[in-house]
Amino acid sequence: MYRQFLALRYLRSRLVNLISVGGVMSGVAVLIIVVCIMDGFQARVRKHVRGSLSHIILSPTVGGDKLPSLATLSTALKQYEPHVVAAAPQIRYPLFYEFKTQRQVALGSDGFTWWQMQTVGIDWEAEKRVSELADALIAARDPKRPFFVSRQAEEHGKTTVLVSRTFIEKFALTPYDPKTGQPIHPWGAMRDDRTGDRLSDPALIKKRAESMLGEELALMFGVAVRDKEGNPKFEADTRNAVIAGVYDSGDALEDSKTVYMEIGSVRDMLPQRYDVSQDPPVPLPKHEYLQVNVKLDDFEYAKAVKTSLAARIGHSFIVETWEDQKADFLQAVDQEKVLLVIVLSFIVLLGGFIILATLTLTVVEKTRDIGIVGALGASRMGVLTIFIWNGLLIGIIGSICGLGLGAWFTAHVDDVKDFLKNWFNIDIFPPNIYHFRSIPTEWNWPSVLMIMGGSVVMAFFAGLLPAMRAARLDPIKALRYE
Amino acid sequence: MNSANASGQAPLLEGRGLVKNYKVGGQTLEVLRGVDIAVAEGEILAILGTSGCGKSTLLHVLGWLDKPDQGSIVFRGRDHSDLGAAERAHMRNQIMGFVFQFYHLLPELSALENVLMPAMIQHGPLAWHRQKKAERDRARELMAIVGLTTRAKHRPRQLSGGERQRVAIARALQNRPSFLFCDEPTGNLDGQTAEDVRHLLWGLNEEHGQTMVIVTHDAKLAAQADRVVHLVDGRIATDHDVDLVEEVALD
């Protein structure tokens, strides 16, 4: 009994032990915080990537004329694989948002700046069934038909788009309901800070006949033509669009670069290709879709379904799971977590060295005590255990304190973020870099317990060396020690 | 006086031909050169000698703190010379009570906790849980015997030298040892306090028949023991009952 008793008493009586406890505590807390944030980050990344990408993605590898119609394809898919719940078509196409920067406005420049984006053409009814876009919609005149603005606009063939909240904020746009003149998004009216105008019919893509582009970029998009002097010229399909609704998927980076349109509008934007073997050349049918998102009843089956579908329709489609598409990104996140944990483990190791140092000091200081308990009948093993207990107690108490601190920090991480932002103007989690507006966390008990257990084991080994030193002391010599 | 020698009883503890050498700086220092000594139950044996004559070493060897290089320790007729470290630790805990010149209390513990220490060493956590109350009662009783009932919660540094030595005596008695080994128990105390402590020790012998071995260089203290062994240069010079000389010395 004396082992634990003395260990506890030494721990209590020496202030320097508090430093050891603090060392272990900070190490454990930092590791817990980092692991929880990284786990949360991973989980949210997966959720959002999955949300916008669906479970299985089919990309056609054949021309539009050889592509089966979507109806045929979905029937076939469901027939091949009972796990298929729904399939939705998409056409993704690059797009530039044209605007004037504040400097261009100030200089009265004629020039424009382009923000590169992609438009995702969707069939709303089908899309609702495969992705979480419907849940992400935060403002629209009619959430059931988010692309519908007014009959008038429809008759005029107006292009209507869904843009993200991030996009709206980035370009200080204010989408208004054309009928009521009220802003359609819930967080209050914003003004176009470049012109000071209220945008009653906000132009997403302003009309510009011709714009010069870098040749490579133009070639990449297949839109390069040459002007009279033979210089490359960008002949873009430009159109004004009406913001019909606003969504926020939570992935700020992806959101700022994505607008949704009706699939028909995007299909119109695809360049027309011709069968040149005929004379005159015959226009080839455009692709009905350039991607098909397939939702399964459970993502668990994605790999198996992928294999079986690849065998059946692999001749005209690339079949991928969403994880395949984002493999590099997901791996980067995983990798980052491993790296951070390894680096931060050094803090715990440092805690171990502090324990080693303070316990060595304690043993020297307690040499006489060691002799006394020896004379009273403590064996060497007993003396060894006193100091091992001392180290263990530091580890256990430090871990528990670290658990508390880590749990608090994890629970209040957004408050801490806001505090830093408000008081020191340090933005530790800018949404444009980290994809998300709030810092995602996920409490992961196995990881937390592993961190705590690891620290206690480390404390044990840190205490072992001084404890062995204490056990080697000769009680008689220790008694003479003054 | 409880002179055991006179009654012809077999000795409780016997050291036979004890030799102990220390190596100091390459030289061998012969501290004990064949000491034969016997302690009878219930007696107060004083080992008298100048400093450096080996009397503390003799005490350590007899008390299983140190191992003799030669010779044997016989306790209750059984040879206990070649006990292992753990067994010797057990013997120290069960059979011996040590009282040191410099008290050697644990500074972080209260007086009562210091007294409880041998019992805590004896019991594991589970046994301690069962025995706690009995052991505490025993410790309180001992604190009362040494006259420190009110100072149980004080730390050693809050106690005077005499009080500390009383706590040390109580601690030595906690596990009901067969022997009390006192190494200069009054060596660090002034006249009156030293006399009080001596009175306490002798009282324990008279009332409870506590066997004691007292190492001292103080002839006056030794003269009050039942028997005195003179240790000169690692050998026993004289060994005699004090009964006869005592009266003469006191005169």
Image: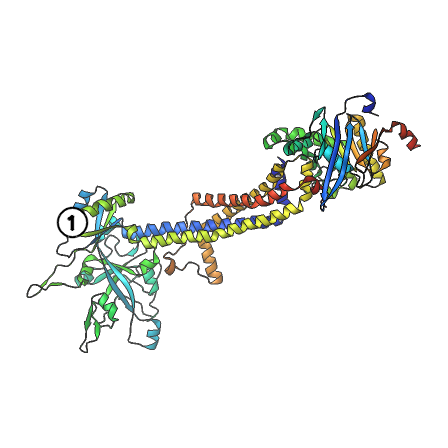
**Residue located at (69% from left, 32% from top):** B92
Q: Foreground: B119 or B28?
A: B28
Can you say whether B191 is above or below B206 in the image?
Answer: below
**Residue located at (64% from left, 46% from top):** A362
Where residue A128 appears, as percent x and y from the top left, is 25, 50
Q: Quadrant of residue B24?
A: top right
The secondary element bearing badge 1 is classed as: helix
Where residue A12 appears, as percent x and y from the top left, is 62, 44
Where residue A426 appears, as percent x and y from the top left, is 46, 62
Q: Amino acid at mark 1?
A: Ala
Chain identifier of the residue bearing label 1 in the image: A
Local crowd at mark 1 within 10 Å, few (<14), some, or many (≥20)? few
Residue A320 horizontal side relative to residue A384, left or right: left
Residue sticking out furthest to the right = B251
Q: Foreground: A348 or B97?
A: B97
Residue A283 horizontal side relative to residue B57, left or right: left
Residue B143 in sight in this render: no
Q: Quadrant of residue A431?
A: bottom left
Count of labels shown?
Answer: 1
Can you say whether A98 is above or below B30 in the image?
Answer: below
**Residue position for label 1:** A71
Q: Foreground: A27 or A369?
A: A369
Quadrant where the N terminus of chain A sits is top right
Residue A235 in sight in this render: yes
Residue sticking out furthest to the left = A279
**Residue located at (67% from left, 37% from top):** A374
Where residue A327 appears, as percent x and y from the top left, is 31, 53
